[in-house]
Image (cartoon, rainbow, N blue to C red):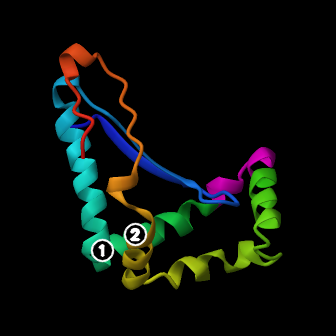
């Protein structure tokens, strides 16, 4: 259905941006968009599985060193730590913060922030081929 799919949350002082991006054929664009919307609805109503939560935690903790493996990355993360007043022990505490997240936390935050009815949809395609329906 899609060549690739990824999501990212960018923290900001005011509400940040959560982005889901995907690459698909024009012919499957509507189906792919609907599947993303379905996944957003599902994460708001159904707790993630134990396996999904553990895999996400493992990824976030395991990949953390890659977020600081250059001077530029370190400077960027240090600026976030200072801006959001995360504390000088943030780097040491990060694994504990991630391990403390529960399935209930994920559900609560998803319900609060991931509203498919309030999203902005941007689609880049050959519209004559894709015939993207911009309705939810």
Q: Position of residue 43 (x, y in %)?
A: 30, 67
94 drawn magenta: no
Identify the residue at image location x=44%, y=81%.
Answer: 105
**Rendered view: 86 above or below 32:** below
Q: Few, some or many C-alpha atoms within 10 Å of disc 2 (few <14, some 14-19, many ≥20)?
A: some
* Lateral position of residue 61 relative to residue 72, left or right: left
Disc 2 is placed on an element classified as helix
The label on residue 48 is: 1
Q: Position of residue 106 (x, y in %)?
A: 41, 75
Disc 1 is placed on an element classified as loop
The residue to which callout 2 is attached is 110
**Rendered view: 14 above or below 22:** below
Identify the residue at image location x=41%, y=78%.
Answer: 108
Q: Magenta region: which residues?
A: 65-73
Q: Nearer the viewer, mark 2 or mark 1?
A: 2
Q: Main secondary structure of the magenta part?
A: helix
């Amino acid at each position: 259905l899609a060549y690739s799919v990824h999501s990212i949350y960018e923290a900001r002082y005011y509400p940040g941006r959560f982005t889901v991006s995907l690459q698909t054929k024009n012919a499957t664009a509507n189906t792919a968009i609907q599947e993303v919307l379905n996944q957003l609805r599902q994460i708001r109503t159904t707790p993630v599985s134990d396996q999904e939560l553990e895999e996400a935690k493992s990824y976030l903790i395991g990949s953390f060193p890659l977020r600081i493996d250059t001077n530029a990355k370190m400077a960027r993360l240090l600026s976030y730590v200072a801006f959001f007043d995360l504390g000088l022990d943030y780097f040491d505490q990060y694994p504990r913060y991630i391990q403390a997240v529960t399935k209930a936390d994920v559900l609560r935050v998803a319900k609060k922030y991931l509203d498919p009815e309030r999203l902005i949809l941007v689609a880049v395609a050959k519209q004559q081929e894709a015939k993207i329906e911009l309705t939810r």
